[in-house]
Each structure stands twice: as C-alpha cells, then as structure tokens.
Image (tube, rainbow, N blue to C red):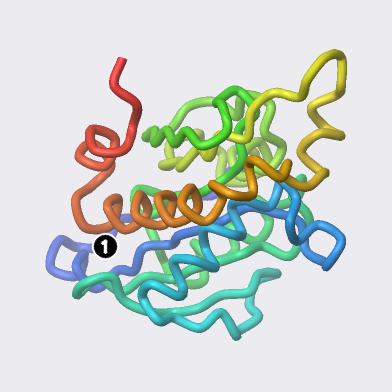
Amino acid sequence: MTFLFHKKQDTLDTFEPYLIVGLGNPGRDYRETRHNIGFMVIDRLSEVIECKLIKVQSKAIIGIGKIGDQKVILAKPQTFMNLSGQAVVSLLHFYKIDPSKLIVAHDDVDLPFGQIRMRPGGGSAGQKGIGSIIEKLGSPDFARLRMGVGRPPGQREAADYVLKGFSKTDMEFLPEFVNRGAEGLKSFVVEGIDNAMNKFNPKL
C-alpha cells in the first residue's frame, strides 16, 4: 500500500518535526548485536540532546526533543527489523511529517566496521528494515545513515552474522563510532543531507 503525503504551506514548514529512526530488534537478546547499531545511535543521540525515550506510540519507543531550534522525534521501532515500515509510516502519518524530514540509521554489511555513509535515498541493498520502510511508504526517497558493520569472515551468512555481538576489537571503537553516527544525524537536521554527506561520507 502506498501512502501519500501532502506538504504543508511554507509558513508552517519550520514547525514540522523531523523523524529520526534507528533500526533494530526489540528485546534483551538483541541489545548488543550488530543489527541493533541503529538503536545504539538513537540512544546516544537521546543522551546528547537530553531527550528521554519513554513514550510508546505507533509500535515504537519514541522521545520528543530539539536539535537547536528544530523539533525532532527519535524513534526505535518495536516490530522487529523486517516490519519496521509499519512503525515508521504510522509515525509519519500521526505527526504529519513529510518523508523529506525522515532519516533512518541502520547497520550495513557492505561498509567496513567503523565507516559511516549518508545517502538521500535509493534501494534497500538487502537491508530488510529499509526494505520494509520502502514498501510501506511506497517510495525509496528518504535519507539514510548507513553504519558499517563489515562482512562476515569466510562463508558465514550475513543474516547470522548481524545477529551476533561485536568482536572485542570492535567493542573498543564502538562508542566512538556510535557517537559519530549521532553527530551525523544532528548534521542532517541542522545542515541538510547534502552538507551532512560532504562532512561525514568517506572521501573517494
């Protein structure tokens, strides 16, 4: 099902919040897995901007705060990864947010661990949560913060790999990596996707 969004008048645009989503799976068993790095970034951002994630709405845990003068809604869908679109699109409709003010943080096995790449849209590249959002939204046109978790060694399946915890070596760098992801989300809100990409994407 495709949902249509009607943009508000320009005079009201500054009052429309941004929706900042981190993808992951709910539950203690998944808390420190690679697949949940999107949740970790949202948790870190909530600390930075002092926004408590305490409200349950539209199948997500959310918090409402500000980045500068801009109202933002932080969200962690509680539907499990493959159904993330249910929560995200429901929140967009409830708060009447245009998809141009949506950004989604998620794990990405195609990037080496520790690398960040922001993009304005595109396909899912096999990431099931992103695929679910594209399907429910009816469009791939929303911003992403891709958090590299690397490819599994040998012949190990990526689906199994992302549901495991980080290595000891990766854990040492994880706080810095997650903090950089949170800064990338802030940059998207304050400076826009193009400037955020210039600042945070690796230089080729």
- Position above or below: 171 against 144: below
Residue 110 pos. (x, y %): 60, 23
Q: Give me the residue at 65% from left, 36% from top.
A: 131
Residue 30 pos. (x, y %): 81, 57
Q: Give me the residue at 78% from left, 55% from top.
A: 80
Q: Is residue 91 left or right of residue 176?
A: right
Q: Is residue 89 visible?
A: no
Q: Is residue 82 left or right of residue 116?
A: right
Q: Is residue 9 left or right of residue 71?
A: left
Q: Give me the residue at 30% from left, 50% from top.
A: 188
Q: Give me the residue at 86% from left, 14% from top.
A: 155
Residue indicated by mark 1 = 8
Residue 128 pos. (x, y %): 72, 37
In the picture, residue 129 is in which quadrant? top right
Front residue of 117/55: it is 117
In the picture, residue 135 is in which quadrant? top right
Q: Residues within 10 Å of mark 1 (few under 14, many from 20)?
A: some
Q: Residue furthest left?
A: 11
